[in-house]
Image: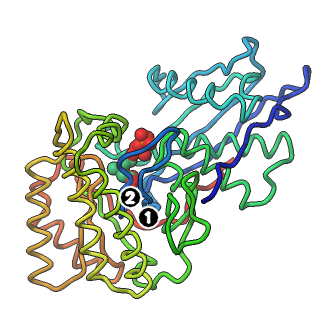
């Protein structure tokens, strides 16, 4: 069992007159889970391990300007898409405040944060993974620049992933590119409940350039947050079976991805997506995040696969949008399928052609 890294460090603060001003910019992507995290223990510890693809085109880009503060607490202004956003401001201030024993320097700074996402606003795409991972990367980058710590890439990424997890569980996987596990997993040394761990080595080439067409079904705000959904797993009568099934699925999925076995990949990812939503439907109070058009699309994916034999599959996150997963080699066929058969079920925002990506990037 891995122990939690202890990042408390009272030395990471500026001496009286040496408080700097400057600016840092990072991009960090969203990710799509294949085996789902749904259910957690304090503090942000998953009930079962999960694995995801980090995306390439769907990312947050966040500019953080900092200057000396006077109040002894992190001071903050938050702009989203150029508009002051008080909700994000309060959430980020609370997050920074909660990190003040890990990064004591946050109490000495005023932050002006300008963030935007490449994916459409309120398209129902979870933005906490990209949004929280980018903030974690910025804070670790500040620590590295100001205090000379975290020079080794491994140490830098591990800390960024741990901090991202504290902001939003799934965000810890976005700190790395490709296929990333979060949660201690039998037979995969290096995996941990506290941070993400990339597992790209030995994965069959068919999965290397995997595509994710994000089919936007409904642009509305989610009625039940992931936080509440996770909490309801504490009293879900099927929870124990679900957590153990997720472990089995993760082991089988990794094996299939090493062997290039798309059939098993399809069976497990689709079952994971449906099980996630089954957990919502069997919680008390129960709730539904899929929409009629989600099911229309799924039925058509089944029919298309049956007819063509092509290895397309779907997954869902905590919302109605469908992520259509397929190998790069069949991109044209899949694009034709979406344009001919699926467009009537999509919201006016259409779909995003994304793919597996290499992870976050420092811009400034
Ligand atoms: C369905 O990571 O958004 O996307 O830790 O409370 O912020 P918090 O939850 P969050 O939950 C994501 C749930 C999921 C599955 C997954 O990404 O593994």
Per the image, label 1 sits on a secondary structure element best described as strand
Evaluate if marks 2 and 1 touch, with contact meaning CB atoms under 8 Å apart. yes
- Location of mark 2 (residue): 32
In the visual, does 330 lie left or right of 61? left
Measured as percent of width and height from the top left, residue 113 is found at: 59, 30
Quadrant of the rendered structure where residue 244 is?
A: bottom left
The scheme the figure's colours follow is rainbow
In the visual, does 296 lie left or right of 25? left
Q: Is mark 2 within 8 Å of ligand 1?
A: yes
Q: Nearer the viewer, residue 113 or 3?
A: 3
Please, which residue is most extreme toward the top here?
71
Near mark 2 (Cα within 10 A), the count class, few <14, some 14-19 or many ≥20, is: many
Vertical placement of residue 54 versus 232, above or below: below
Q: Residue drawn 61% across and 21% down? A: 76
Per the image, label 2 sits on a secondary structure element best described as strand
Identify the mark at residue 53; answer none if there is no mark: 1
Vertical placement of residue 38 versus 83, above or below: below
Measured as percent of width and height from the top left, residue 133 is found at: 55, 46
């Amino acid at each position: 069992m891995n122990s939690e890294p202890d990042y408390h460090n009272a030395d990471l603060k500026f001496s009286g007159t040496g408080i700097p001003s400057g600016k840092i910019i990072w991009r960090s992507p969203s990710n799509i889970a294949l085996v789902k995290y749904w259910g957690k223990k304090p503090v942000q510890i998953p009930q079962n391990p999960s694995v995801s693809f980090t995306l390439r085109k769907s990312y947050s880009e966040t500019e953080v300007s900092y200057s000396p503060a006077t109040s002894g607490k992190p001071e903050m202004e938050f702009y989203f898409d150029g508009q002051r956003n008080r909700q994000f401001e309060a959430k980020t201030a609370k997050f920074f405040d909660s990190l003040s024993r890990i990064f004591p320097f946050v109490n000495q700074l005023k932050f002006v944060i300008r963030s935007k996402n490449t994916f459409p606003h309120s398209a129902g795409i979870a933005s906490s993974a990209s949004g929280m991972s980018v903030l974690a990367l910025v804070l670790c980058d500040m620590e590295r620049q100001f205090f000379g710590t975290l020079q080794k890439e491994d140490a830098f990424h591990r800390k960024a992933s741990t901090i991202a997890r504290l902001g939003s569980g799934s965000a810890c996987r976005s700190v790395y590119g490709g296929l990333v596990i979060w949660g201690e997993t039998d037979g995969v040394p290096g995996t941990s409940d506290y941070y993400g761990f990339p597992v790209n080595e030995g994965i069959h080439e068919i999965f290397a350039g995997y595509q994710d067409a994000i089919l936007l079904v409904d642009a509305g705000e989610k009625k039940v947050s992931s936080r509440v959904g996770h909490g309801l797993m504490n009293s879900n009568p099927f929870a124990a079976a679900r957590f153990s099934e997720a472990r089995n699925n993760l082991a089988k999925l990794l094996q299939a991805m090493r062997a290039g076995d798309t059939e098993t990949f399809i069976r497990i990812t689709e079952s994971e997506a449906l099980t996630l939503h089954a957990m919502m439907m069997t919680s008390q109070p129960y709730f539904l995040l899929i929409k009629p058009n989600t099911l229309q699309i799924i039925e058509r994916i089944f029919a298309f696969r049956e007819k063509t034999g092509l290895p397309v599959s779907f997954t869902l996150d905590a919302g109605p949008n469908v992520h259509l997963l397929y190998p790069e080699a069949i991109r044209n066929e899949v694009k034709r399928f979406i344009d001919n058969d699926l467009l009537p079920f999509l919201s006016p925002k259409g779909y995003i052609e994304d793919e597996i990506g290499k992870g976050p990037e420092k811009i400034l």
